[in-house]
Image: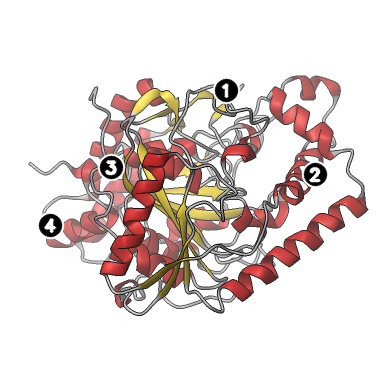
Amino acid sequence: MTDLSALTARQLLAGYEKGEFSPVDATRAALARIEAVQPLVNAFVRVDAQEALAQAEASAARWRRKEPLGLVDGVPVSVKDLLLMRGGPTLRGSRTVRPDAAWDEDAPSVARLREHGAVFLGKTTTPEFGWKGVTDSPLSGATGNPYDPSRTSGGSSGGSAAAVALGAGPLSLGTDGGGSVRIPASFCGIFGLKPTYGRVPLYPSSPFGTLAHVGPMTRDAADAALLMDVISGPDWRDWSQLAPGGSMTAALDGGVKGLRVAYSASFGGQVAVRPDVAAAVRAAAGKLAELGAYVEEADPDFTDPVEAFHTLWFSGAARLVQHFGAKQRELLDPGLREVSALGARYSALDYLAAVDARMELGRRMGRFHATYDLLLTPTLPITAFETGAEVPKGSGHRRWTGWTPFTYPFNLTQQPAATMPCGLAADGLPIGVQLVAARHRDDLVLRAAHALNHLGQETNGRSLKAI
């Protein structure tokens, strides 16, 4: 019999249409996976099996009538616990959030999924308010990696990445303010996309401002394109949303022949990349060339913008806790408490200087993409390290930005950037390759990733060896 938890969303939809199985079957399979993997990796903070099955029954009835509600009718999905989902609390990984408040509103992306008939499995883990690149919090504990639960899943969308990798629903919504979709997707061996800022509406707005994006976490680029076609729908609550564009699914099959691709192994020697990671990413660049792209080694023209990023990120953290009293602050993750205190020391002039640096970085990348359609880099220079730590032991890094130099620059520039698996490292953990395009060219990122679809098939959606 087919293992429904191993299928992509598009495969599930094809099976529903043919009557081979139903949304109830798929939802039961996903719930069974959650029951099996949750004690090992801690990917979920809330699961409502009864409600999910009720939604699946309603979807199955629509499919029997051949009247699906939308593009993902009956597909099991999960939602990062930073995004509102009516019917239960959104605790954001924090002991400072009241669970007994009124939780009667969906975030825009969740609302679009509901309109298209998705089946909601539950909410996934996040570090407190999504502030760092690993997933652990005083409220929910740590989320382990599907390949080795003693290693981190990455963050801040670590629960979503682990859930998708382990078959607990093929689609998940994550958020990305400095790599928070791409970091865990890379560590867990799945696909993740940070769209162009504004492509997916967000409400409430993030305390980290226009660094924060909502994006799909899936097994492959085709499912991500499908999910983008759903969650990019308009929502008046986000005044910064971009005008609706064309279908991402329709753009998948253009291939990469003739595309101009810059391969940057280390941002011009600025980043120390593990040799096995570097070799896997170089092989991905070679595969693009085999598929007809013009690939050459070229580095974008910028130095590490970490100071500007820290000014904006830490200021956001300070704003987040600005109205917290002393008792609430004592409940916070100590790292979040520390960076929010740093952020409170910045002046308006410091902030505006960081904005200037951000604008200059955007200008430089705009010029770069006048020559190159795509930039290819490692997603991360390392593989997953031990859980419960913000930085790898012995790395010398102080903050999570020390080991994520390939991700946060493109939050500053608001460009579309995706990660996909490109193999396993010597330690048996997944490696990710990152594809970046000019603003508004999400279609190019998805096209190239779709062309490379089978590159990391040994990692894509692989289960824990213990199961």
Do the CB atoms of the residues marked 2 and 4 lie less than 8 Å apart? no
Q: Amino acid at mark 4?
A: Gly
Residue under the image location 63 percent in, 64 percent down:
301
Q: Which residue is mark 4?
A: 19
| Disc 1 packing (10 Å; few <14; some 14–19; many ≥20) | few
Q: Which residue is mark 1?
A: 394
The answer to which of 190 and 248 lies nearer the viewer is 190
Residue under the image location 64 percent in, 31 percent down:
397
Give percent across and percent down for residue 466. 24, 22
Give percent across and percent down for residue 26. 23, 44
- Please tell me whether mark 2 or mark 1 is closer to you in this view: 1
Left or right: residue 457 versus residue 274 is left
Q: Amino acid at mark 3?
A: Thr
Residue under the image location 78 percent in, 24 percent down:
328
Q: CA distance from mark 1 to mark 3?
A: 27 Å
Above or below, 154 against 108 in this view is above
Q: Quadrant of residue 388?
A: top right
Q: Which residue is mark 3?
A: 459
| Disc 2 packing (10 Å; few <14; some 14–19; many ≥20) | many
Local SS, label 3: loop
User: Which numbered disc covers residue 315?
Assistant: 2
Is tag 2's residue or tag 4's residue first in the polypeptide sequence? 4
